[in-house]
Image (cartoon, rainbow, N blue to C red):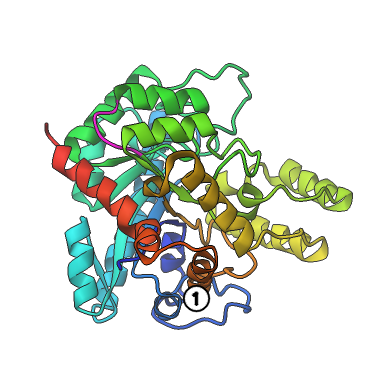
Amino acid sequence: MLTVDTHSDTAFSLLRTDWKIGDRHDPSARGAGKIDLPRMKEGGLDAEFFAAFVGQGPLTPEAYVKAKDRALQAVEAVRKMTEEYPSMIGLAVDPEGARRLKKEGKLTAFIGMENGYPIGRDLSLVEFFHKKGVRYITLCHSSDNDICDSSTDRRDPEDKGLSEFGREVVAECNRAGMIVDISHASERSFFDVLDVAKAPIIASHSSARAVCDNPRNLTDDQLRALAKNGGVIQICFLAAYVKTPPVIPEREKALKELEAKYGNIRQIQDEALRTKAMAERAAVNQKYPQVRANVQDLVDHIDHVRKVVGVDYVGIGTDFDGGGGIVGCDDVSGMIHVTEELIRRGYTDREIEKIWGGNFLRVFQKVLDLAGK
């Protein structure tokens, strides 16, 4: 089988001078990250979507230019990685490319874009990034943008959903063969996208809200609508989306103080400041450790999706290096443990193949087949 993880935030680690993705890093070491090429092999992961993530900033022409440049940095870093390690990994832009690389004994790098912010108000940039090798766009992130409203931004309590410009973006993605990703999008945005999409869509890293009540997760109604569209939900490994954690007052206080000091850490544009803020958050996590979700909790989400809409509409999107990681699968070397749990629960080889990539690759190919039609 061809195993695919549809979302990681490892791309910007490639810009570090003190870290090489071709080296194996001890998962317990600070700064090791969740993904490197040797550990991908260990965990049995064939293909990784490296996301060019850009935190939401001001909706101004100057900020759009900066966001585009930052996204390009990540895209080029992924390309450079495949040039530096040609015997280990190659770049693919379609399912066939990944299958060819697997036959050659190599890993696959796909490129995604997390947050449509770098598009700004310029529709031509969808095609521009597609030509650079980007194959999905997560329409928004943790804040509303010009394309649509976010599931976690309710500064304006009204959910306005997909904007008129957002409708044009979805149409252009369908024309170009770019997968539309609705992870992070609000409920109204989700249904608005389905109203206008001419191709299947994905949730690249989301889980089931019935199992864990978090606005980033999809409701059963959303799951049914996604299945009707022919799309797929890729279950996220970020613990807060997997299992509702018990409240630790001291931890909550420390995290609120951190947010008051830095704001949303993932939206900090200055890399040095973001690194400092993340180190402080790591210290809070170490001092007040949260009860963490485990592999069994994660597979509960897969079970739920199978129960609601069937096994053809679920896959894996870890969000490694963006917060993803659970007990039993805290980095890419532990991916095999998810398969072990699926086997324990009676999933067949064919079902496991669908979950580990078959379902997503079906959607990917359908988007490409419908491009331009």
Position in image of residue 156 (x %, y %): 61, 19
Identity of the residue drawn at 61% across and 39% down: 210
Q: In this view, does 48 lie above or below 317?
A: below
- Residue 198 falls within the magenta-colored stretch: yes
Span of residues in magenta: 197-201
Q: Disc 1 residue type?
A: Ser
**In which quadrant of the rendered view does residue 229 lie?**
top left
Q: Dot 1, how many residues are within 10 Å of its Cα: few (below 14), some (14-19), or many (20+)? A: many
Residue at image coords 39%, 79%:
41
Residue hosting label 1: 333
What residue sits 26% from the left and 30% below the top? 123
Q: Where is residue 326 in the image (x, y as percent from the top left)?
A: 62, 63
Count of marks, rendered view: 1
Secondary structure under the numbered disc 1 in the rendered image = helix
Q: Main secondary structure of the magenta part?
A: loop
* Residue 150 at least partly seen: no
